[in-house]
Image: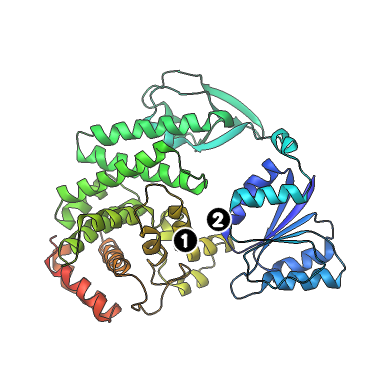
Amino acid sequence: MSQTLVISDDEALTELLNLNLPIYVGTDVVTKTNYKNAATLIEHHPGFHLIICADMSGNENTAELLFKLNEIHHRKTPIIVLGLKAKIPEGLAITSLAGNDLKLIIQTAAKLLKVTPKKMIEQMVPDFFPIKTSFCLTVKKSPCEIFTLKGEDTYELNFSLNENIKAGTIQKLMDSGVDTIYVRCADRLKFVNHVNTSLLSRLSSSETEEEAVSAAEEALQVVREEALKGEVPAPVTTQELTSAAIQSCINIALKNPGVATLLKKLLQNKASFLYKHTQLIIHVSQHIITNTEWGSPEQKMKLAFVAFFHDICLTDDKFAHYKSDTMVTIDTELSHVEKDVITKHAKMAADIVRNFPSAPIGSDVIIMQHHGQVSGQGFAHTYTNSVSPLAIVFIIAEEFSHLILAYPENTDLASKKPEMISRLHSMFTRSKYQKVIETLETITF
């Protein structure tokens, strides 16, 4: 099997290439985040059949440094450069691609590695696809065969096609430590559509707020998993589930005009931090837009969509607590990959939303800027007017939600409102931010 080196600091892209190149092109993949990390490997491992690299990794001219290294060692390894900023010398086997189009990258890699369309079709595809066991909690009848993994590569059939799944069966599996189930790859879309349809039914028929909160939180988890797979466009049922879940979140906010009442219900439901955070941002942003002269129903819906997707790439509650580059840098318990995802999660989420068919126009820009950085990378030290007006609304709504969630569970939040608003005024000193903060004087607890 051929070997391909991928050099890029784009975590989402490298994950997609790591997954897809072995499947469709039949090449092993090694990844490095920048030239410095890759140079030693290239010098001591001349056997790479293909190199895919970003034109830039941060401030590093990755591609140009790679060209020089190849010239020094008289290498003729073909290179795919992602981006058009690098100056390409003559005589090297270099292909430049304008962006990160996964399909085009795979097609170009196949061509350079002399993998014909026929061979691509014949590449071995994994037999089974992993899915979180919790996604089966709403499934009453198995839409396909469902397996659990026994040993390294032995799959045991747990549920046959159309088998009734008794209440509590999935929970028992989870309690026994089985957090992943498997379906055949050919059945993945069928399974996802079935779960989405089941959740849609729960969202539309929830008789109590507790059921609505539970269904909305589960929908957020399902949409996150699907979004991170990078399927373009997203399945129709995933789009429908997203719209229904966001509307459900808005309805929950409308039925609970007091922040403390809403938070109490979220705590009773034992909702995850990421979901509580999302629901509170929707609640607060709806209030802000209602109390601005230029607010509109379309903007309320757009900010609800942004709240649903802004942290879609953060897969653990603890990641949502980081609010500065320093916090990320000094945390020795975070892996390099985790630090990279936290730092770039705004950009990664914006890239996902940009390809989401039902995304409101401009929602990707707000997501990109929701930590005050126009680039979507890192956290702003000082907040400027360079971000959009709706991004400013979102930034204030998110910080206010963080302050609310930072208090112990039984705190009298109404008595803490002046303290929180004062804190916001000291954090965000520019007039555009101050005007948004002033709308929170009338928010009820």
SS under mark 2: helix
User: Where residue 271 sits in the image (x, y, percent)?
Assistant: 31, 47
Q: Residue at x 18, y 57 (%)?
A: 259
Please tell me how crowded label 2 is: few (under 14), some (14-19), or many (20+) other residues with Cα within 10 Å. Answer: many
SS under mark 1: helix
Quarter of the image where one finds residue 193: top left
Left or right: 7 with respect to 274?
A: right
User: Where residue 278 sits in the image (x, y, percent)?
Assistant: 31, 54
Q: Which residue is mark 1?
A: 345
Q: CA distance from mark 1 to mark 2?
A: 9 Å
User: Where residue 340 sits in the image (x, y, percent)?
Assistant: 54, 64
Amino acid type, residue under disc 2 in the picture: Ala
Q: Which residue is mark 2?
A: 12
Q: Is residue 25 visible?
A: yes
Q: Residue at x 17, y 56 (%)?
A: 260
Amino acid type, residue under disc 1 in the picture: His
Above or below: residue 68 compared with residue 155? below
In the rendered image, the residue lying farthest to the right is 74
Quarter of the image where one finds residue 281: bottom left
Quarter of the image where one finds residue 368: bottom left
